[in-house]
Image (tube, grey):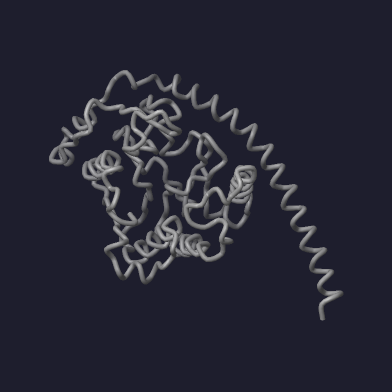
Amino acid sequence: LKDLSNINEYQLAMETFECYCIYRRYAWVVINVSENDTLKLLCPQEQFFFQRHCVTAQFLQENNYYDYVLFVDSDMGVINPKRRIEEYIMDDKDIIFYNRIWNFEVMAGSYLAKNTIFVINFLRMWANYNYRLPHSFHGSDNAAIHVCYLFTYEACVRAQLETNKKWKKKVSVLPKGQSWARDGWLTDSKWSEEDFIFHGWQKRRLNKKAFASWKLPFLSTKFNMSLCGTNSYIENWKYNQTFARNPNEIRAELDTIITLNEFEYYKEKQNAGEILANLTKNELVWHNFTNQHIQ
């Protein structure tokens, strides 16, 4: 967490994870960067989007008795505690990402990472992009990334992750709909036994008429944490059964979204290739011009 200023926004999501981890005997670690002067010194990135990956790298380096870490956004909650993190471990990969279903994005807010030197260096490299992006990409001013180019940019990043030979040896990007988490609002909060984690549980978006709004799939938001270490832990997940669905129904809904999105992805991927080719051509022309005219 950057700080505790809006932690109530994510209370339900975080309590589902804490209870789940207690029952499964996983370590549940929440790091408040604002209260850790050492971390602020070691990870001075101004943008928390980047700083958080530096913090994770530092945590792995200092705690080598952890074999893996599942990094999650604070608005990610456990919808189905019967699933296990181990189901998604790939022994031959150091870090696993996944493609979001509804757009071209490789999800930055959750990844499953092995505690290795490669991962620590990878996360630090990622964090240090804080200093490499042009000013127009910084801060919350996402409008500076013009909307007409945003999807092309995401398609380009995804294509690089999926085809870079060096990274493919260590990095995996799971296909759409095959990861540990998804945006719950895609199916209007309906879920099946195949689901594990929902993304997007922000209090301010609950029952709102807005993008990525969601409905409460439970009868209550109160979690009795004293039950979490017992076989009665499941009593905390008081489901509203109107949201429980057959896996085939949920899969059909998601497959429809995936098919439509993949068609758009390949169009934008082609656009990205053309843009990169033009940039390379222009850089070569400029390089030749400066060599000839600037001594």
Can you give x and y, in whole percent of width and height, for residue 14 in the image?
28, 43
**Percent x, y for residue 114?**
41, 55
Q: Is residue 129 above or below residue 154?
A: below
| Viewer-closest of 170 and 72 | 72
Find the residue positioned furthest to the right.
292
The image quadrant that residue 220 belongs to is top left
Residues 19 and 36: in front is: 36
Q: Relative to residue 24, is residue 80 depicted above or below?
A: above
Seen at 32% across and 32% down, the residue is 80
Against 12, residue 27 (above or below) is below
Picture quadrant of residue 39: bottom left
Q: Please determine whether, in this image, residue 90 is positioned above or below residue 63.
A: above
Residue lying at 34% horizontally and 21% vertically, measured from the top left: 244
Q: How many marks?
A: 0
Q: Quadrant of residue 103?
A: top right
Q: Nearer the viewer, residue 222 or 224?
A: 222
Give coordinates of residue 204: x percent, y percent. Answer: 34, 37
Residue 242 rendering spot, x and y as whole percentages: 32, 18
Closer-to-camera residue (280/214): 214
Residue found 30% across the figure and 56% down from its top: 3
Quadrant occupied by the C terminus: bottom right
